[in-house]
Image (spheres, rainbow, N blue to C red):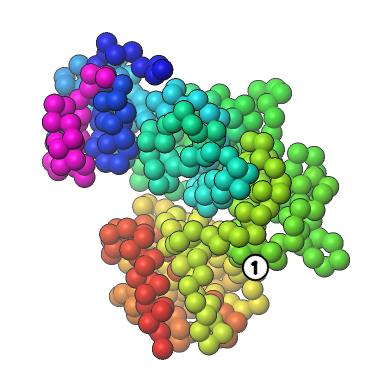
């Protein structure tokens, strides 16, 4: 039984993937609603008109008077709440909400909620696979894959949800069984006034949580918790009580919980220190959600990672090539540079650049100087990255991804790795980060 009252009028603002899931959900509930989008031809307009011809839809500049006809606006993540028309409606008493709020009100199974600047898709997928291995009927989605409202089912025993800061802005009470912010670094500074505003948006994930998971190596992941809220931690240091970490014995490094070794790190198929942290985060979340260790460890032994996320492409002449196109911010690129760089004998040839979204690239300098033989730069903000790196490393400018791969090959020695980890969005040169990653992989595969 839905918690939505049917005698109120709602407006879905934004007709992309999550907006269309809202339309389907509200239509199933028999709720009176309309749709608005700032674009003249939003992505799902044809689908809406075909499947729901009775629903009023307004495209183009948002009309405040129209928005104020609603009791509640379900705002899509792509539209900033600071949009003047939304602010004007809110000032007149209209509630601003989103699909995750609606999902939380209607989900009947526990929720594992995962956010963070980086690695949330990898950890979300991994926890989902652990739940499957444990025999659970699990639904995985949110910001990753299937929109939240399309996952709702009475058969589901556990929801594993990746949530972005944009989704959390409109989430007032999630009530997750266990919630985490994996890490916090600058991202989307073109949307937020600064890191504190972005940090606050991320931390809405903890509202109503029954347990939390915290990254010991990132103080910004720790919520201001009430007394008695169970807290589990993960990190690359040796673990103690209610903690997951790394422990070394007789020259062998282990994933460990409290004072118990769980499995040797060498049995992981995913490489790098950052992926060891991802494995530990997934173990902490799964353990908090009641998943047994044997199922979680068997999943870790078979998990090969996600496409475009530090994904191994091939080895040629002793050089490995990695596709980390999903690294659309500085923090994600740093995780890959430090993670791979500290886990290999050779050096990295880094391919970076694109649309920096207003980021500060100076944070790359020390890690690049430590782990990189050279940096190959392309895209709109190549000059900004070059200036931030200064004389810390050799720099090469290129005009295309094919040229970047060819130049990287010529710069690499046996034992090195070529890493596409752009620290930027892709929209200046590509349709999306997936296209960028596929074209990189194709260029690498074409090397003779």
Asked which quadrant contains residue 442, the reply is bottom left
Q: Nearer the viewer, residue 290 or 337?
A: 290
Whether 381 is drawn above or below 48: the answer is below
Label 1 secondary element: loop
Q: Position of residue 1 (x, y in %)?
A: 41, 17
Q: Is residue 97 visible?
A: yes
Image point (80%, 45%), residue name: 258
Asked which quadrant contains residue 274, the reply is bottom right
Whether 208 is drawn above or below 302: the answer is above
Q: Is residue 196 visible?
A: no
Magenta run includes residue 45: yes
Whether 396 is drawn above or below 312: the answer is below
Q: Position of residue 93 (x, y in %)?
A: 30, 14
Image point (27%, 10%), residue name: 7
**Numbered marks: total:** 1
Image point (81%, 60%), residue name: 248
Q: Nearer the viewer, residue 229 or 161?
A: 161
Q: Position of residue 17 (x, y in %)?
A: 30, 41
Q: Which residues are magenta?
A: 30-58
Asked which quadrant contains residue 227, the reply is top right
Magenta run includes residue 191: no
Label 1 CA crowd tier, 10 Å (few <14, some 14–19, many 20+):
some
């Amino acid at each position: 039984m839905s918690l939505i009252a049917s005698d109120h009028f709602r407006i879905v603002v934004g007709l992309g993937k999550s907006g269309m899931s809202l339309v389907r959900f509200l239509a199933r509930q028999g709720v009176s609603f309309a749709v608005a989008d700032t674009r003249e031809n939003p992505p799902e307009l044809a689908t809406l008109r075909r499947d729901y011809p009775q629903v009023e839809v307004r495209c183009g500049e948002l009309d405040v008077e129209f928005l104020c006809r609603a009791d509640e606006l379900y705002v899509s993540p792509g539209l900033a709440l600071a949009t003047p028309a939304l602010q004007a409606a809110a000032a007149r008493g209209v509630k601003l909400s989103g699909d995750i709020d609606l999902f939380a009100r209607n989900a009947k199974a526990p929720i594992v909620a995962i956010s963070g600047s980086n690695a949330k898709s990898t950890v979300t997928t991994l926890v989902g696979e652990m739940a499957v291995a444990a025999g659970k009927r699990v639904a995985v989605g949110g910001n990753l894959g299937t929109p939240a409202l399309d996952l709702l089912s009475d058969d589901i025993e556990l929801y594993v949800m990746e949530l972005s800061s944009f989704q959390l802005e409109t989430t007032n009470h999630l009530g997750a069984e266990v919630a985490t912010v994996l890490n916090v670094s600058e991202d989307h500074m073109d949307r937020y006034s600064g890191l504190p505003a972005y940090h606050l948006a991320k931390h809405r994930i903890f509202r109503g949580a029954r347990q939390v998971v915290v990254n010991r190596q990132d103080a910004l992941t720790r919520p201001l918790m009430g007394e008695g809220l169970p807290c589990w931690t993960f990190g690359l240091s040796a673990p103690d009580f209610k903690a997951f970490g790394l422990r070394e014995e007789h020259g062998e490094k282990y994933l460990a919980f409290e004072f118990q070794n769980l499995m040797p790190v060498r049995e992981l198929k995913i490489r790098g220190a950052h992926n060891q942290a991802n494995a530990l985060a997934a173990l902490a979340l799964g353990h908090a959600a009641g998943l047994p260790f044997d199922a979680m460890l068997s999943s870790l032994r078979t998990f090969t990672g996600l496409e475009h996320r530090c994904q191994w492409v091939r080895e040629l002449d002793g050089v490995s090539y990695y596709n980390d196109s999903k690294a659309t911010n500085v923090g994600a690129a740093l995780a890959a540079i430090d993670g791979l760089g500290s886990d290999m004998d050779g050096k990295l040839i880094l391919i970076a650049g694109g649309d920096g979204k207003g980021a500060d690239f100076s944070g790359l300098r020390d890690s690049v100087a430590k782990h990189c033989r050279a940096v190959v730069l392309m895209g709109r903000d190549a000059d900004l990255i070059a200036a931030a790196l200064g004389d810390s490393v050799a720099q090469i400018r290129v005009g295309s991804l094919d040229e970047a791969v060819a130049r990287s090959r010529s710069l690499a020695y046996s034992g090195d790795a070529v890493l596409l980890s752009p620290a930027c969005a892709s929209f200046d040169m590509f349709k999306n980060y997936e296209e960028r990653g596929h074209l990189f992989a194709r260029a690498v595969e074409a090397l003779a």
